[in-house]
């Protein structure tokens, strides 16, 4: 019980201090919140280091056992060593580090994003079938928006880019705001449950 009660109490106290600091101009609360932010950065750094160690251990085991696609694990370990050790030894502003970042990390990040967008688009076309009026409207809007972002749409009709911009600014924005409002309400409700100790799932699946 103490393994759940003590973290819940610490979490509630820290969250209460941070919330009150945003509404009350009390020097003590300001000092406490600043110290908590510093500790948050330290804990995040240790969490990142632990995650890196776990990732390296996972790929070392794959290489040792020569499981499927183990050469990719070798490439991952080399990249981690080059970026990690290089950044620690020379600093992120060093020419060596910036060269690897600009010529390896950035192109691979762009390529990964491009492939992700492609798979999302193809999956959306496979998933959306015109079985109702709402599905038809969704598919038509998606086609207009996609055509409005490529030269082909303007070649077909100069009104397509204007229609795509209207869809983004009016119906899309209205839907996004509705989602944001409901998400904010859900986050507030979850935060209140955490503060008063009713929600403890963050300490493990099924925690009561």
Image (cartoon, rainbow, N blue to C red):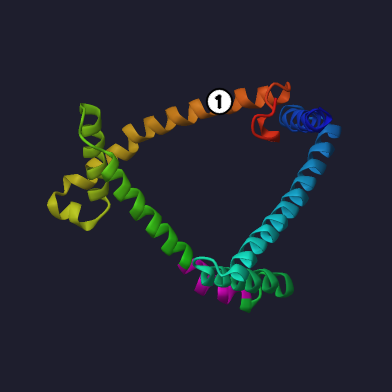
Q: Disc 1 designates what residue?
A: 186
- Residue closest to the eye, 48 or 25: 48
Residue 138 image offset from top left, x and y in percent: 26, 35
Picture quadrant where residue 31 is located: top right
Q: Quadrant of the C terminus?
A: top right
Q: Residue at x 21, y 38 (%)?
A: 140
Confirm whether the magenta stretch covers residue 106: yes
Category of crowding for the residue at label 1, using alpha-carbon neighbours closer than 10 angstroms: few (below 14), some (14–19), many (at least 20) = few
Stretch of the chain drawn in magenta: 97-107
Q: Secondary structure at mark 1?
A: helix
Residue 11 appears in which quarter of the rendering?
top right
Q: In the orientation shown, which residue stands out farthest toward the right?
A: 28
In front: 126, or 164?
A: 126
The residue located at (35%, 53%) in the rendering is: 119
142 left or right of 155? Answer: right
- Magenta span has 161? no
x and y, in percent, of residue 136 in the image: 21, 33
**In the image, is 69 to the left or to the right of 93?**
left
Please report the residue visible at 79 percent of the width from the left and 38 percent of the height from the top: 33
In the image, residue 61 sits, relative to residue 199, either above or below, namely: below
Q: Is residue 67 left or right of residue 18?
A: left
Q: Residue furthest bottom?
A: 96
The quarter holding residue 113 reads bottom left
Q: How far from the left and from the top, in percent, is residue 158?
A: 16, 49
Query: Looking at the image, is 20 positioned above or below residue 117?
Result: above
**Depth order, front residue of 23/148:** 148
């Amino acid at each position: 019980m103490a393994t759940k009660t003590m973290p819940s109490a610490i979490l509630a106290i820290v969250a209460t201090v941070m919330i009150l600091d945003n509404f009350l101009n009390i020097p003590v609360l300001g000092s406490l919140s600043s110290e908590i932010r510093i500790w948050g950065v330290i804990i995040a750094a240790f969490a990142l280091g632990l995650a890196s160690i776990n990732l390296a251990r996972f790929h070392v085991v794959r290489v040792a056992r020569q499981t499927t696609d183990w050469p990719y694990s070798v490439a991952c370990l080399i990249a981690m060593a080059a970026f990690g050790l290089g950044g620690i030894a020379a600093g992120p502003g060093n020419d060596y580090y910036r060269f690897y970042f600009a010529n390896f990390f950035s192109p691979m990040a762009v390529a990964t994003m491009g492939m992700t967008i492609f798979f999302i688009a193809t999956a959306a076309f496979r998933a959306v079938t015109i079985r109702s009026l709402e599905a038809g409207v969704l598919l038509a809007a998606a086609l207009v928006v996609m055509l409005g972002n490529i030269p082909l749409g303007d070649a077909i009709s100069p009104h397509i880019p204007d229609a795509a911009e209207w869809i983004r600014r009016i119906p899309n924005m209205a839907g996004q705001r509705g989602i944001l409002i409901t998400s904010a309400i859900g986050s507030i409700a979850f935060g209140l449950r955490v503060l008063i100790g009713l929600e403890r799932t963050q300490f493990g699946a099924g925690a009561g």
